[in-house]
Image (spheres, helix red, strand yellow):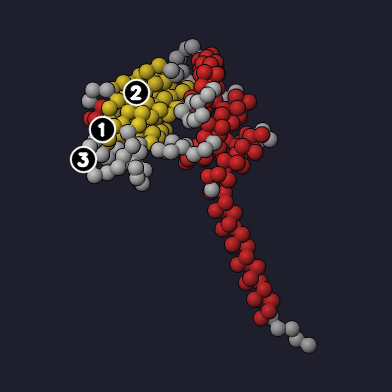
């Protein structure tokens, strides 16, 4: 007796559709910040540093530098630091600890500052003293905050040393053009970079905004004789109250 193919085709369509829903569900779950955070911590506990770095970095970048940092930001940053230390990536570890200091709770700040000092020394020790194979480095800054904000100050530091500081006239850094903040030859290897800004809210602008003093740290790596440009800018994501966020891009 011949068997009808219609039930088989219907079953096949059902299974394909079910798999599609599972894929969509898995994708949504993986993009949930809390799920990414918990997965990253679990990976760090297993010392699966590559996966932990990917997930914890995604959580910290996406959830920790806005007006209201998510719960777990400090723990995530410190887990990143442990992974970097395990692989002797001292500049990355220092940046992770420095960022962790900006997230609550702050009961153990003194111990973390001591840890950061030790990591900063390791960053310096790992760099060659000669600049014979130095890297041309350029830092550029642009403030993209809207009219509701008043830029009060901007400071950039490389390897713990301030290289650009503007308080009077900092409002002139707003706009579409880039300001060349620093240019020098640096040793090849891994370095640290910190941006600090202060934004106030102008009265009567009709936009709710959040005044804030921002600080964010990064690590960057220089190859011998390979010019490097780092663009730092303050941006204000959509939403209210408006809040500036610091970002960095390399070219």
- Element marked by disc 2: strand
Q: Which numbered circle lies on residue 204?
A: 3
Q: Residues at badges 3 and 2 in contact (C-beta under 8 Å)?
A: no
Up-down: is 58 above or below 109? below
Q: Dot 1 corresponds to which residue?
A: 150
- Element marked by disc 1: strand
Q: Which numbered circle lies on residue 155?
A: 2
Q: Which residue, as the protein is rendered here, is positioned at the far top? A: 129
Q: Which numbered circle lies on residue 196?
A: none
In the image, what residue occupies the spot 47% across and 12% down? 130
Where's the N terminus, which quadrant? bottom right
- Mark 2 packing: few (<14 Cα in 10 Å), some, or many (20+)? some
Which of disc 2 and disc 3 is earlier in sequence?
A: 2
Q: Is residue 28 left or right of residue 204?
A: right
Up-down: is 239 above or below 61? below
- Mark 3 packing: few (<14 Cα in 10 Å), some, or many (20+)? few
Which of disc 1 and disc 2 is earlier in sequence?
A: 1
In the image, what residue occupies the spot 22% across and 37% down? 203
215 or 15: nearer the eye? 215
Q: Residues at badges 1 and 3 in contact (C-beta under 8 Å)?
A: no
């Amino acid at each position: 007796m011949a068997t009808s193919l219609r039930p088989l085709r219907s079953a096949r369509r059902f299974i394909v559709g079910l798999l599609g829903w599972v894929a969509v569900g898995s994708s949504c779950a993986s993009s949930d910040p809390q799920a990414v955070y918990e997965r990253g911590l679990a990976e760090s506990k297993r010392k699966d540093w590559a996966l932990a770095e990917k997930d914890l970095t995604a959580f910290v970048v996406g959830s920790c530098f806005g007006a209201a940092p998510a719960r777990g930001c400090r723990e995530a940053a410190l887990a990143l630091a442990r992974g970097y230390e395990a692989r002797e990536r001292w500049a990355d570890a220092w940046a992770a600890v420095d960022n962790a200091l900006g997230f609550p709770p702050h009961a153990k700040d003194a111990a973390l500052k001591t840890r950061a000092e030790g990591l900063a020394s390791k960053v310096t020790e790992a760099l060659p003293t000669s600049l014979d194979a130095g890297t041309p480095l350029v830092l550029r800054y642009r403030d993209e905050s809207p009219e509701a904000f008043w830029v009060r100050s901007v400071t950039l530091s490389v390897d713990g040393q301030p290289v650009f500081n503007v308080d009077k006239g900092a409002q002139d850094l707003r706009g579409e053009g880039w300001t060349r903040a620093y240019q020098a030859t640096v040793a090849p290897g891994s370095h640290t970079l910190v941006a600090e800004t202060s934004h106030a809210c102008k009265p009567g602008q009709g936009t709710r905004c959040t005044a804030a003093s921002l600080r964010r740290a990064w690590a960057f790596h220089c190859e011998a004789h390979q010019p490097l440009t780092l663009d730092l800018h303050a941006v204000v994501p959509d939403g209210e109250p408006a809040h500036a966020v610091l970002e960095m891009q390399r070219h």
